[in-house]
Image: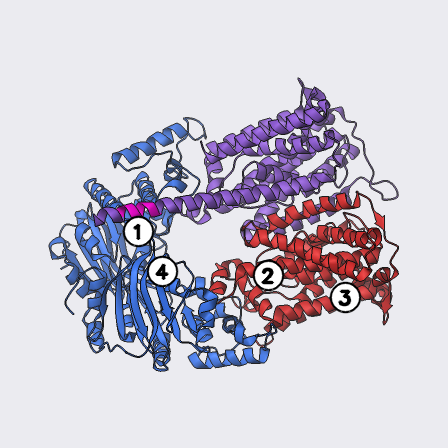
Amino acid sequence: MSSQAVRRLILIGLMIAIAGLITSINPVFLTLGNLQKLFQEAAQVGIIAVGFTLVMITAGIDMSIGGIVAITAMVSINILSYTKIPVPVFVPLLLLVGAFVGFINGYLITKFKLPEFIVTLAVRSVLSGLALVIAVKDSLGFVQNVYIQNDQYLWFGTQTFGSIYRTTIAFVILGVATQLFIKNTRAGTNIYAAGANPVAAKLSGVNTERTVLGVYVFSGICASMAAIFISSRMMTAMPELGIGSEMDVIASVVIGGTPFTGGVGDIWGTMLGSLFLALIKNGILKTGISPWYQPIAIGGIIVVTVIVDVWQKKAHEKLTARAKLRKLDAEARKSAA
Amino acid sequence: MKKLKITNEIRLGMVLVGLMAVLSVISPRFLSLSNLSNVIWSICIIGILASGAIYPRITGGIDLSLGSMAALTGIIVDMFMNKMGVNWIPAILLTMVIGGLIGLFNGFIVAKIKVPAFVVTMAAKTYLYGVALVVSEGAMLAIMKPAPFISIGSDKLLGLPIPIYIMLTLVVISQFVLKRTSFGRQDLAVGPNEVAAKLSGVDPDRVRLISYTISGVTSAIGGVVLASLTRQTFAAAASGIELDVMTALVIGGTSAVGGRGSVVGALLGAIMVAFIVNGLNLLNVPAPYHPIVTGTVIILALLLNEGYLVPKKMTGGVKNQKQAAA
Amino acid sequence: MTTQTNTNDDLLVCKQIVKSYNGPLVLDRVDFSVKRGEVHALVGENGAGKSTIIKVITGATNRNSGDMMFDGQVIPLNHSRNNAQDLGIGVIFQELSLIPGMTVAQNIFLTKEPFFPGTRFINHRLMNRNAQELIDRYQFPLKATDVIDKLSIAQRQLVEILKAMSMNAKLMIMDEPTSSLTKTEVAMLFEIIRKLKSDGISVLYISHRMEEIYALADRVTVLRDGKLVAVLEKEQISPAEIIRLMIGHKLEENALSHKLEPKDGEVVLEVKDLTSVGKFEKVSFKLHEGEILGLGGLVGSGRTEVVRAIYGIDPIDEGSITYLGKPYKPSVLRSIKSGIGFIPEERRLQGILATLSITHNIGITNLDRLAPKFVLNLKKEGEFSREGIKLVNVKPPVPEQLVGNLSGGNQQKVVLAKWLIRNLKLVIIDEPTVGIDIGAKDEIYTHIKNLASQGVSILLVSSDLPELTRLSDRIIVLRKGRVFTEFKDCVVTSEKILRAASGILEEA
C-alpha cells in the first residue's frame, strides 16, 4: 500500500474517532441538521481549496484568495442592489472577477519572476481595500449590511437538493471534475510536471509559464465561486468576507497531503482535508470548547502535518540511500569472490 | 562604487524629500510638527518589528508571526504586571524572553526540520493568535497601571514621544549588528549562497536560529510598546502588521537572494508608506484606499528590487536577483 | 583517416562547424559525422569542444557557421531543441530530465499522451501498454507503472532512453552515461546500446573511460582545442592511441620538461585508509610541507569526495587523518581555525557570494580575525580586502565591486584571496581554473606556486592534465575510489596520467 493510501486511511480513521468522541459528548453532532451544516462548511472552504491545491502542486502559493472572495462578493452585492441583471446572467460572469485577479497574480509571477508569496499578499491587500471601496454604503458613507432577497441568488447557498446543500454538491462536482482533469488531461499532467521539476518539464516541451499562469487563474475562479455560495448562504456579504480564510484553505490542502514543495498532491486529499477541518471546527463548537482554541487547532495542525511530512520524506530518503549502499556492498563482495 | 550601499538609502531619502515637497504643496497642514510627529508615531511599532524581522528575511526566510506575537506579548506583559503583580521592569524582560523563545521555536522548525519559513511562521501567526485569545479570554483589556509602564507610551522626551526613541535605538542597534558585526556578515552570506557560506565557516542553521530569535524579541518589544501606547491589549491588536513590516523591508531594499538589506532603509520605507497614507488622509481619500496603495507600492517595490522599471546600468547588469543567484 | 565514401550511410553530417561565445573559437571548422547504426565515440580533454558540439547538434546553442545535415534534411542555423527532437535526435541528459512523482509511462509520454478516440482525455491504459511494449522490446528491467522516485539512477537512464525512443529517435546522444552506475549496471547499459545498434539506431557516446570506448565504439572522433584531430575506424581503436591523439604532441613537449621532485619536509597531513562507503575506499597518502600533491583521476573517481571529507564537509566512515602530527577529526570550522583553506570546484555554486562585494567575500572567511569579540573591525576588513585584491591582482581593484559582476578569472582570484590573506598551512584546491581565460590561469598558477614556496602544503585536484603535471610535485591517481598509482621522482606527462586514470598500468 502506498504511503499516500496509509495516510488517508489514518486520516479517515482519525475522523471517525473524532466524530465518535464528539457524539459521545454531544449527541446533537450526529443529527442531520448538524451534518448538513458540517458538510456545507467543508464545501465552502473546499471549493477554494480545490483551486489552491493546483497552485500548491506547481510549488506556488496564492495568498490573495481571501481578497478574491471579498471583492467578488462586493461586486455581486452591487449588482444585486443597483441593477436588474438576472442572476443566471451575472453569476457566471462573477467568476471572471477571480479569473482576472488570478491572471494578474500569474502574470506577475511568471513574467517578472516575483516571489509568489509576497506578490499575492500584496494583491490581497489591494483587493481588501477595493472591496471596502465598492461596498454598498449608506448616506453617511458607512458600509451597509445589505440583505440579499433575490430568491434566485439564494438558491445557491440556502437550499438543499435531497438532504444535501447545493454548496456541498457543487463542491463535490468541482472536486471530482478537477481531479479528473489533473489526472487525465495533458494540461493536468503539465501541472505536476511544472511543480516537480520545472527544468525537466521545459526540456520535455511543457510550457511551464502558461501552466503556472493558468493555475492561478483557476485558483481565482474557485475563490469567486466560493464567494457566490458563501454570500448566498449568509444572505448578505460584508467587505471582510473571506479575508483570513487562507489559513483554513491552506490547512485543508496540507492535511490532504499536498506538500508545499510541489509536484505531488490531489483533490481527493484536499476534499478529505477540508472535511477534517470542518469536523474539528464543528467539534470545537459542539463540545463546548471555547472557539478561541480554533486558531490554535488550525495552526497546530498545519505545523504538525508539515513536520510529519518532512520527517517521513527524510526517513524514506534514508531508506533508499541504505538500499543503494547494500547493493554496492553486495556487488563489491561478488567481484571480490 | 564606494557609495553603492549608501546610495540606496540616499535614493530613498530623496524620494522621501520629494514626496514631502509634493505633500506640503498639496496640503499646508502636512509640514506642521504635529502632523509629522503623528506620522512618525504611527510607524513606531512597524520600525521596532522591522528591526528584528530583517534578519530572517535576509537569510531567505520570513517571519509572519510577528503581529500575533506582538499582540500575545502585550497580553502577557499586562498579565505579569496586573494579575501576578510582577514589577514592570522584570515583567517586560520576562516578556522579551518569552518572545525570544517563541522565535527560537520558529527558528528551530525552519533551520533544523527544514520546513519552509512562511509555512512555519504563518501557522505560528494563527496559533499564537489563538493562544492570545485564550490567555485574554477573548476580551479587550484596558491597562491603567502601573504608571511607569503607561508613561512609556504617553510621555515625551524633548517634545517627542518615548516610543520614537525606543524605535530609533532599536533601528540603530539593528543596523549596527547587521553591518558591523560578525553575525550580521554571516546573516548576509546565508541568503545568496548557503553552500559557499558553509564552506567559509558559517553555520547556516545557527544563523537562522538566532535570526528568528531576534525577531521574536523585537516582536515582544513591539508588543510591550503597543500595549503601553494604546493602553489596551487584545488578540487582534497587531493583526496584519506583518504586511506593513514586509512592505517596509521590501521598499527598504531588503532582498533575500541578494543578501542585501538595511534597517535604516526599512525605516525610510515605513516612513514613505506612512507619508503616502498621511497624504491620502490629508486629501480626504477614504481609508479603504490605503491598503490598495500599500499593495501597489509593494508590487512596484518588488519590481524595482528585481531590476525592472530602472535603466539597466543602475542595476550593474544584474537583471533579476533570482536569475543572478541561479 | 577520414573516409566518407558512401554518404547515404551517414545519418548526421557536420561540415566546417564554427562556434564561438564572443571570444575565442570553441569549435574551429570541425567536420564530424555519424553513420547509421553505429556507436560513435566522441573523445577529447576537458575544453576540447565535446560538450559544445553536442549542444550544437541538440539545438541547445547555435553554431556560427557550417553546414549540418541530419537524415537527409538540412539543419538550419537557428536550430532548436524542439527541432532536434522532431528530427529524431534524442539526448540522455547527464542531469536527468525526468519528473519525480510520475510513473515511467507518464514520463515517456509527457506532452505526447495518447487520448481516448475523439476526446482530449488521456488513455492511461493505452499509455501504459505502449510504454510496456517499448520496455519489453528492449527487455528493460522496468515496469510502465513504476514511479520514478523508486528507480535507481541506471533505471532512470533507461527511462530517458525510452523517452527518446518513443519520439522515434534515430540518434541517441549519451554524455558520460556511466559516471554514476555500478558495474552490473554498466554491463546492462552496454547490452542495451548494442541492442539499439542492431535496431539501426546510432549512438553518439561521450566518455572519458577508454575501456568503454574500446568495448563499444565502431568509430571514434577525437577533438583537441576545438579542432578535429582524427577519426579512428574500429580496427584503429586502442586506448593508448586515443590518449596519444587527445593529448597531442605540442603539450607533451611542454609536459616533458616537468620533472616531479617530491619534497621531503615535515609531514603536514597524513591520510590512512580513508573510506566513505560508495565514494572512496582505503585512500592513504602523505603530504609534506611546501609540497603540491596532485590528485588525478577521471570524474567520479573519488578525488573531490576525498578532499571534501578531509576538509570536513562530508562524513568519513573509516580511516584516520593526522594533521600536524596530531589525530584530526575534520569539521569545516575546525579546519578553518587550524589553517586549512578550501577552494571548491564550481565557484558559482560553492565559492562566491555573487551579490556581495569583494570585501564581504574576503571578510567572510576571516571573521575570526575581524571580529574576535563580535564587533567587526571595518578598517581591518578594508585592509584585508585591499591586501587580497593586491595579492592576486583582482581587476577591477575595487573593494566594493559585487563579485557577481567580475569575470570568471577574477571571481576565482577573489576566492583565492579570501584564503591567501590567512595564515595557511594547507590549502585544498579543486579544479582551480575551469572556465577561466589563459591569462588569469597563469596568474593563478603563479599564486599556487608561490604559496608552496612559502611552505604551504597544497592538495590539488584537477582534470586539466597539463595543469596537474605542471603544478604538482607529486601526483596520485585515483581510480574507482582507490589510489591506483603514484608518480614521483620521474618525468610525468599528461598521457601517463590519463593512461593511469584509464587503468593502464606501466612501469615508471
Mark 3 vs mark 4: give the one in front: 4
Instruction: Say which label, 3 or 2, has the lower sequence index.
Output: 2
- Report which residue position mark 4 lands on: C305
Query: Amino acid under label 4?
Result: Glu
The chain containing the residue under callout 1 comes to: C
Mark 3 vs mark 1: give the one in front: 3
Find chain B in the image and tell me its colour: red
Query: In whole angstroms, how far apart are the C-alphas of marks 2 and 4?
Result: 31 Å
Find chain A in the image and tell me its colour: purple
Give the structural element (helix, strand or loop) at label 1.
loop
Give the structural element (helix, strand or loop) at label 3.
helix
- Report which residue position mark 2 lands on: B58
Identify the residue shown where x is 65% and y is 45%.
A64
Image location (x, y in percent) of residue C454: 37, 82
The chain containing the residue under callout 3 comes to: B
Identify the residue shown where x is 51% and y is 79%.
C384
Q: Which residues are magenta?
A: A325-331
Identify the residue shown where x is 21% and y is 43%.
C191
Q: Which chain is blue?
A: C
Foreground of the two, A103 or B116: B116
- Report which residue position mark 1 lands on: C75
